[in-house]
Amino acid sequence: MAKKFEDLDNIKGFGKDVNDYLNHYVTVSDAKSAAILGTNFILLGVLIGLDFEKIDNCFLNCLTFTAIISSIISVLISLKSIYPRLPYDKNKGLIFWESIRNYETIDEYLKDYKKLTEEEKELLYAKQNYYVSLVLKEKNSNVRNSIIYLAISIILTILLIITIKYK
């Protein structure tokens, strides 16, 4: 069985290198989103743990509400970035996992793979790289927006804690 995978291990070329590069940054983006998500849960824990008896005026209520909403928005954006929203693809394909799984057997997949010339493999990677770059653009935009809402929530939480402490 290992012999059948030899061909797949020897893929080389510019398209494959770019694909590896892009997928590395997809992983980095997902890690950032996960870190932001964790930070938001800690921050929400801090906000929920505040002494609400000392939050007794409109300003503090608005500050608390805005900090919580900002953090929740950041959580939702982070989740949107992490969760893959992929349409089901019924077509068979040689690179994208969702298309590869439509092959009935590995032998059927390898048969189609072996038919490709190196140029055709590069073109398939080029097409895949374009779509991965679109996903990466959206993920990075989500990470950036999530960081903005997290920063707002952190600043408001710090103001809230300082205000409550010195009240």
Image: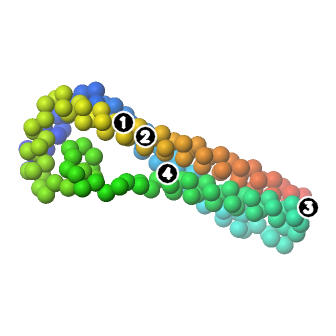
Between the C-alphas of marks 1 and 3, the distance is 55 Å
| Residue topped by disc 3 | 167
Q: x and y percent of residue 14 in the render?
A: 28, 27
| Residue topped by disc 4 | 81
Query: Judging from the image, what secondary structure is the residue with disc 1 in?
Result: helix
Q: Nearer the viewer, mark 2 or mark 3?
A: 2
* Amino acid residing under circle 2: Leu
Residue 142 appears left or right of 55: left
Numbered badge on residue 134:
2
Point out the tag, 4 or 2, that comes first from the N-terminus. 4
Between the C-alphas of marks 4 and 2, the distance is 13 Å
Disc 4 + disc 3, Cβ < 8 Å: no
Residue at image coords 81%, 61%: 62
Q: Nearer the viewer, mark 1 or mark 3?
A: 1
Point out the tag, 1 or 3, that comes first from the N-terminus. 1
Between the C-alphas of marks 2 and 3, the distance is 49 Å
Q: x and y percent of residue 124 in the render?
A: 24, 36
| Residue topped by disc 1 | 130
Between the C-alphas of marks 4 and 3, the distance is 39 Å
Give the image quarter of residue 126. Answer: top left
132 or 54, nearer to the observer: 132
Residue 70 appears left or right of 136: right
Residue at image coords 60%, 49%: 146
* Amino acid residing under circle 4: Ser
User: Residue farthest to the bottom?
Assistant: 53
Q: Residues within 10 Å of mark 3 (few under 14, many from 20)?
A: few
Disc 2 + disc 1, Cβ < 8 Å: yes
Q: Residues within 10 Å of mark 4 (few under 14, many from 20)?
A: many
Point out the tag, 4 or 1, that comes first from the N-terminus. 4
